[in-house]
Amino acid sequence: MHTSLTPPNFVIPLNKQIYCFKISPYEASSNLFVAALVNKIVIGLLHFPEDNNNEEFTWERLRELDQDTRSHAIAFSPETSLSMLPKPTIKFCTAGADFIVRIFRSNLDDNDTVQEVNRHTSYVNDVAWDLSGKYLASVSDDHSCQIRSQNDDFKSEIIFRLKSPGITVCFHPENPDKVLVAEKRGTIVIFNIENQNAVNSIETNKSPLMGADWNLRNQFLVTSIAAGEASVFDLRCPYRAMETKTLHEDGGLTIKYSPNAQQVVASVGRPAVTLVVAHIKSEKTELPILVASLKLYGGLSWHSRLPYICCADDSKLSIWKVYVK
């Protein structure tokens, strides 16, 4: 892949290595982010030029929470809102290096709580909330996907057994009863939580499968990255990929659809550690929209309404504005 590297538009130094990172995908908290460092969690707020009308980017550190273990993944609850009165509601979950999924709650002032909910028997690779906030899912190297319901304070669990480590998990854009799990061996499985069975599966014919994502703008489209090759599948005919494109010659680490452009994905992979933003449906010879070099990857997150992509790069957050034609 021959293209010039794009420097970030904005950089946020956090001074210690970032192990995972997420921007809230919800309208009521769209500028909120959480970054997990080795022994604490930073909750921050982004202020973009589009919001400020003064062409400046700023950010503020809202809260720091202590944690006894390193976190590998983060997911925001839909209950998170900065407009709640009298105080905001911040709620998110983390996947700990001790195999435990925890729910953090904070009002950014005098009330911070932590609740342990899921306990796996090996590393937890990803966590996700459905868009209604009803279900919390986690996938692990222990070959399982665990689902817990907020209706009973996350006490009961549904376990879907996998045939290899679960790498990523995400929910259907509209139906909270359907959850997608990417398995490392190259299989994507969609489970129905209510019926507790698999309703669809996709074989990528590549491994290791390192990421998959559901398109929020088209519920029939799923993308994956395996061995550096990005693929798009239509769930109405999932037996072969609609599109395939090599984004990383030496393997990919993650892939995420843009929430604002149906055919655009962001991925991180090798050689070195490289961020690529590209049209997934374009000709294979077309150059990417953006390519950037990272020192040490610690998370990838799109802004839900503004044209920005952010990567945790060692001890800083790097933010690029994505110009899509």
Image (cartoon, rainbow, N blue to C red):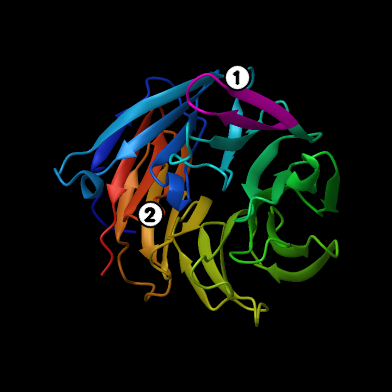
Give coordinates of residue 2: x percent, y percent. Answer: 29, 58
Decide: is 3 above or below 123: below
In the foreground, 171 or 228: 171
Q: Return the disc, 2 or 1, that comes first in the chain's sequence.
A: 1
Residue at the far front: name it. 86
Which residue position is annotated with label 1? 67
- How far is the residue under mark 2 from the one under mark 1? 32 Å
SS under mark 1: loop
| Residue 68 shows up from this direction | yes
Q: Are marks 2 and 1 in contact (CB under 8 Å)?
A: no
Residue 278 image-quadrant placement: bottom left
Which residue position is annotated with label 2? 276
Q: Quadrant of the N terminus?
A: bottom left
Decide: is 301 above or below 171: above
Residue 232 image-quadrant placement: bottom right
Q: How many marks?
A: 2
Residue occupying the point 66% across, 66% down: 175
Give coordinates of residue 56: x percent, y percent. Answer: 17, 39
In the foreground, 19 or 245: 19
Q: Which residues are magenta?
A: 99-116
Decide: is 20 above or below 188: above
Q: Residues within 10 Å of mark 1 (few under 14, many from 20)?
A: some
